[in-house]
Every structure is written in structure tokens, then in C-alpha cells.
Amino acid sequence: PGGAIVYVLLLPRVTDLDGNRVKGPAYTYFTSDTALDAVSVKGRAALPGETTLTPSSSSVEKEPSVGMAGAVFFTESASVRTFTDSLKVVHTESLPVRTTGMAALLNDGSFATKVRKGEYEVVAVADTNADGLADLASSPVEFNTDAESLRLILAPESRPKPINAYRR
């Protein structure tokens, strides 16, 4: 549809038609419009307990391990529409929530993408053992694109799911 941004992400370990494995993420985005109406977002996802000190925090954090395959999903914040009759509320409905942006999570935990200006719920997920399931995930974080950068903390996932299952 017009105005849509299409994201394509192939994670490491995916095989091509000849059976060769992708060694790093292949990632792009595009639109059918003449201009990409989006803002740049950069960030980092880290593991608790490792020794990299982040400039935005005095806490000690761990950078993700080499060989990780992961993604960061940007889901539109849920909005609510209220219908009224005079001053009396007739009914309230939540608008659908859907993932409208994503980025590849690189081995060093960094990510960068472009998304439409707005508010998002952001989650990062990673597969560190090549089983196709996200064994690390961040808690969802509310993010406004005015901030331009984002920091997420990955933690062990109690019930690993395929990475795509985190997309709405």
C-alpha cells in the first residue's frame, strides 16, 4: 500500500538454495513512495552482568556474544479511540497494534533502522545457539522517535519462541 515501509531481514544461519549458510544479517527497507518519510533510530542491546560500561548509565552491562542472530521489533503503541454522545461515553475501542518497523541486531548488540515518526513499543530478541528460537529477549520498552537512540537489556527467555513470533 502507498506510504508503507517494507522491511526485509535474513538472519545468520539461513541457507540459500545451494545450502550455503548466511554468515551475517542481510537487511534492507524500502517504500514505493518517492521519498522515505522516516526518522533514523540507533541503539544497543546488552546483556546484564558483563563488563562494558555504557555512557548513558553507570551500570555494568555485557555485550552480546559473537554468533548471535537477532532482531529488534518496533510495534506501534496501542491507541484508544473513544466515541461520545454529547458528554456521555458511548464506547471505547483499542486500535489494532502491529509491528511496523524492525532492525537486525548485530553481534556487538548495535542496531540502526528508519521508522515513521511516532511512539513505539520496542523489543529485541536473539538466538545465541542456532536452534532458531530466541533464547534472549528484552522487556518491551516505550520509545518515542524524538529520542533518536534506544538502549535495551537482553535477558534469558523463559519460554523460547521463533524470532518471528515476537512480531505482531
Image (cartoon, rainbow, N blue to C red):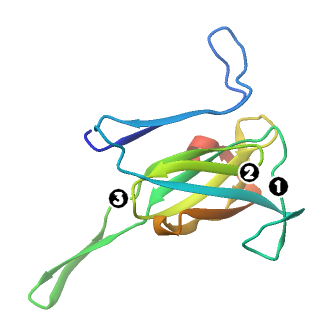
Q: Pick the quarter of the image with the N terminus.
A: top left
Q: Residue at x 64, y 54 (%)?
A: 124
Q: Amino acid at mark 1?
A: Glu
Element marked by disc 3? loop
Q: Which residue is mark 2?
A: 109
Instruction: Say what secondary structure mark 2 lies in.
Output: loop
Q: CA distance from mark 1 to mark 2?
A: 6 Å
Where does the image place residue 125, in percent across and percent down from the top left? 67, 50
Q: Label 3 sits on what residue type?
A: Pro
Q: Dots 2 and 3: beta carbons under 8 Å? A: no
Q: Earlier in the sequence, mark 3 or mark 1?
A: 1
> Which mark is on residue 96?
3
Q: Amino acid at mark 2?
A: Gly
Which residue: 8% across, 88% down?
Answer: 86
Mark 2, residues whose alpha carbon is within 10 Å: few (<14), some, or many (≥20)?
Answer: many
Q: Do tag 1 and tag 2 residues touch (Cβ < 8 Å)?
A: yes
